Amino acid sequence: MAVASERNDPRRELVIRPGHHDSEYLPDLWRYRELFYFLAWRDILVRYKQTVIGAAWAIVKPLLTIGVLSYIFGKLAGMPADGVPYPILVAAAMLPWQFFASSVSDSSNSLLAGSELVAKVYFPRLILPGSSMVVNLIDFAVSCVILVGLFVVYRFVPSPAIVAVPLFLLLAAVTAAGLGLWFAALIVRYRDIRHLVPFLLQLGLFASPVGFSSDVVPADWQLLYALNPMVGVIDGFRWSILGGAHELHAPAVAVSVVVAVALLVSGLAYFRRVERTFADVI
């Protein structure tokens, strides 16, 4: 009876401790999976709520960019197109780049956007940048309509290697997640970095082979150029879609994979190290 009365004692304190150790943190991610689903669904609704053309923005934005880059690099600069229509060459790079850039931008600002939730209750903070990438994956699927339309217009038959596209989409997601975790953790402490992220992404658009083929880069510089992990992503997408019209530089792709994994591992390690301070400084 003494035990029962102790359990029913209203003065008894309940202490909730967040799982700081990986052995506790991973189960927490699974226990809070419903929160992940809710936040992802919320982001989808917010993205398309009270918009004029709704999900069509996922098509309009990259389509306009494809048109501009095709004109600048294809018409004005006369860049080589590997024997394929230039808009298809650009589209095969623009779609993964759009997914990458949007994912990095959204995940970088996810902690600030959810600051009230972070400051009040405990949950694995990885859920916020992770859920913010889901809507961009949906945008990518919708924007693939652009490629289908270009195939029809130019009567282009994609390569059978197109089945490898999910692998390079995964590489883009790994790269975006790594950078997103770094920026999300840094922005909580240094707010001015959020103004730097759009500039870096804009710079990366022109530093990556989106509007041109990476074949224009001298062979001696290919591996150094591949330190930009989006080079491997874009080359992989083009090879998957264009087939023999675009050569896949396996060593360069391998370098991009190593850099992408390093970004994810280091970003995750830094995020976990400073995660316990988010509620205090956000």
Image (cartoon, rainbow, N blue to C red):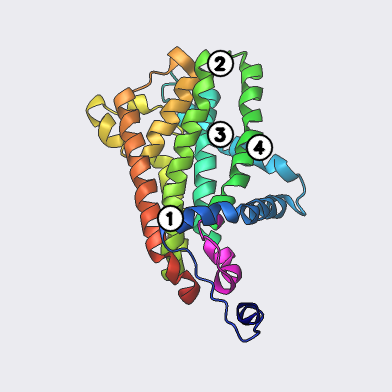
Q: Tell me which residue sits at (43%, 33%) in the image.
A: 233
- Helix, strand or loop under label 2: loop
Percent across and percent down for residue 140 are 60, 37
**Amino acid type at image mark 4:** Ile
Q: Nearer the viewer, mark 1 or mark 4?
A: 1
Q: Which label number is shown at residue 66?
A: 3
Magenta span includes 269: no
Q: Nearer the viewer, mark 1 or mark 2?
A: 1
Task: Determine whether, in the image, residue 111 is placed left or right of residue 271.
Answer: right
Task: Determine whether, in the image, residue 54 is placed left or right of residue 93.
Answer: right
Residue 136, visible in the rendered structure: yes
Q: Which label number is shown at residue 23?
A: 1
| Residue that extends furthest to the left in the rendered view of this protein | 220
| Residues in magenta, as a range | 111-127
Task: Determine whether, in the image, residue 39 is placed left or right of residue 268.
Answer: right
**Amino acid type at image mark 3:** Ile
Q: Tell me which residue sits at (54%, 76%) in the image.
A: 15
Magenta span includes 123: yes
The residue that label 4 is drawn on is 59
Going from N to C along the chain, the mark reached first, 3 or 4, is 4
Q: Are marks 1 and 4 in contact (CB under 8 Å)?
A: no
The residue that label 2 is drawn on is 158
